[in-house]
Amino acid sequence: MFKKVGPKRRSRWRTPLVAAAVVAVLVGGASAFDDPVENAPVAVEAPTAVETPTGDSGTEAAATPDAITPSPSPSAAPSVAPSPTPTLPAEPVAAAGTALAAVADLEVKGRAPKTGYDRDLFAYREYDQDRNGCDIRNDILRRDLADLVTGVGTNGCVVETGTLDDPYSGTPIAFTRGSSTSGQVQIDHVVALSDAWQKGAQSWDVTTMREFGNDPLNLLAADGPLNAQKGDGDAATWLPPNKVFRCGYVARQVAVKREYDLWLTEAERDAMVRVLGDCPAQELPSRETAPLMPELAAPSPAAPAPAVEAPAPAADAAGAQDPRFDSCKDAKAAGYGPYVSGVDPEYGWYRDGDSDGTVCEG
């Protein structure tokens, strides 16, 4: 059973015992803490007459032995009922196979220096892990977004539009591919690359780093600004604002760290246990991918449109037709482009590196 480790707490049950002892002394009894000599009975001598100040009446009073009241003898302390045995909060039960149980399998030690860290070592988007001909960003967008439309001529790979039910904020985000809009949805490494570097990845070979950087288990489509806010934080320093998703988020971190034998700091371990303690049955997530979607690559068949005149070949400012340069770079330098698939014949002359249906764009 997973056992939560934390600093020792002082028992709140000592207070009643101390209070009882104080009451015993005040009521009139010598306690076990009294000095026996200081509390022994003392013989009382008969007092002598004491002259008192003369008042307005001019009378004087003299003390007599009968006027003295002897001190009472010490009496036994009253019995105190024993305090009940304290009932401590129950530790969260970590069933086998749950994320909470898996935390106990992870090593706990200090963070290593960040010396030598380079994000490029993890080859994110440079490696086609599942060999489907599509980069990992679009693989994750197809997996995590709904209402997808993929680009024409991309073999169902490139996501043009869709809707993300953002797990970090709990609000939907409308995604549209473009230089000014794509950043609204980013792909987050749930266990940040820098965090992994400081907790075991420094010893990995090139292949392991590349697998980690492109592993769908460690990737989620998420709100861009919140992903930037997270940075390289771990569970002790950053959690999603959407509290409903925190259990799933921490469980994914646990799964990734167990898969790649990464360690935890003590603060990180305590934060994971605290979150998962509210959902002890939370299971570890599995690695999921999304298939290509060629059926969404082209619009649905529609009624034939009226014949229109074919567009004129693209021309530069002087009206000259593209002479078919060796590369898009040369074409753009001469003032030609861009060319769109299905519209411009020049599109087939040049390579569409990002498979977005447009070549020689600015």
Image (cartoon, grey):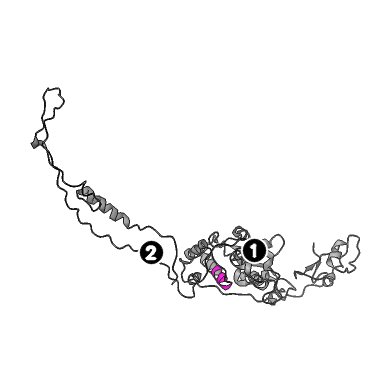
Where's the C terminus, which quadrant? bottom right
List x then y, in percent, for residue 67: 10, 36
Residue bearing mark 2:
89
Mark 1 element type: strand
Q: CA distance from mark 2 to mark 1?
A: 42 Å
Q: 288 or 82: nearer the eye?
A: 82
Which residue type carries mark 2?
A: Pro
* SS majority, magenta: helix
Q: Is residue 176 visible?
A: no
Which of the two discs, 2 and 1, sits closer to the camera? 2
Q: 211 or 105: nearer the eye?
A: 105
Quadrant of res 166: bottom right
The 10 Å Cα crowd at callout 2, few under 14, some 14 to 19, many 20 or more, is few
Q: Is residue 208 visible?
A: yes
Which residue type carries mark 1?
A: Val
Which callout, 2 or 1, points at the residue further toward the start of the chain? 2
Q: Which residues are magenta?
A: 253-260
The 10 Å Cα crowd at callout 1, few under 14, some 14 to 19, many 20 or more, is many
List x then y, in percent, for residue 108: 52, 66
List x then y, in percent, for residue 92: 43, 68
Mark 2 element type: loop
Q: Is residue 67 left or right of residue 278?
A: left
Q: Is residue 34 left or right of residue 144?
A: left
Q: Which mark is residue 185?
A: 1
Q: Is residue 63 left or right of residue 296?
A: left
Q: Is residue 269 magenta?
A: no
Where's the N terminus, which quadrant? bottom left
